[in-house]
Amino acid sequence: MPYFVYLLASKPNGTLYCGVTNDLIRRTFEHREGQAKGFTRRYDVKHLVWYEPHDDVREAIHRETRIKKWNRAWKIELIERMNPGWCDLYETLQL
């Protein structure tokens, strides 16, 4: 079962959120619809701008923990390498 580390943004260069999930489509949908309580709903963070698959849940959690400690510039660089236009990648996921 794949696991995903992902970054959401409120808008290009806006507020960022990093998470981990085993169901990227479902979890992103929950953020988009305001079903995820807390930070993302409070700050309207719902655009999937980066993700990375992992085969092992421990690897995914470790990666998420490291990314959360990064400074903002490093997170932006990570996003822009995969998604220079800050497009909402949710629309590209296989539904």
Image (cartoon, grey):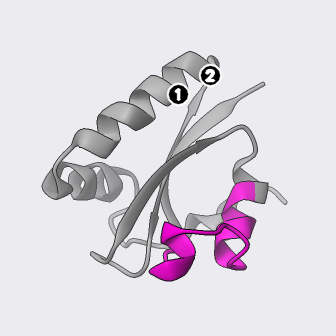
Q: Quadrant of residue 93?
A: bottom right
- Return the residue at label 1: 60
Residue found 67% across the figure and 62% down from its top: 28
Residue 47, label in figure: none
SS of the residue under disc 2 = helix
Cβ–Cβ below 8 Å for labels 2 and 1? yes
Q: Quadrant of residue 84?
A: bottom left
Q: Position of residue 77 (x, y in %)?
A: 22, 53
Residue 38 vs residue 88, the one in the foreground: 38
Left or right for 55, reference 29: left
Q: Position of residue 17 (x, y in %)?
A: 42, 60
Residue 48 vs residue 70, the one in the foreground: 70
C-alpha span from label 2 to label 1? 5 Å
Residue 94 vs residue 55, the one in the foreground: 55
Residue found 51% across the figure and 28% down from its top: 61
Q: Position of residue 64 (x, y in %)?
A: 43, 36
* Residue 46 appears anywhere in the view: no
Q: Quadrant of the N terminus?
A: top right
* Residue 73 appears anywhere in the view: yes
Q: Which residues are magenta?
A: 27-45
- Image: 25 above or below 22: below
User: Which class describes the residues within 10 Å of circle 1: few (<14), some (14-19), or many (20+)?
Assistant: many
Left or right for 94, reference 52: right
Q: Quadrant of residue 73?
A: bottom left
- Image: 56 above or below 78: above
- Return the residue at label 2: 57
Q: Is residue 78 magenta?
A: no
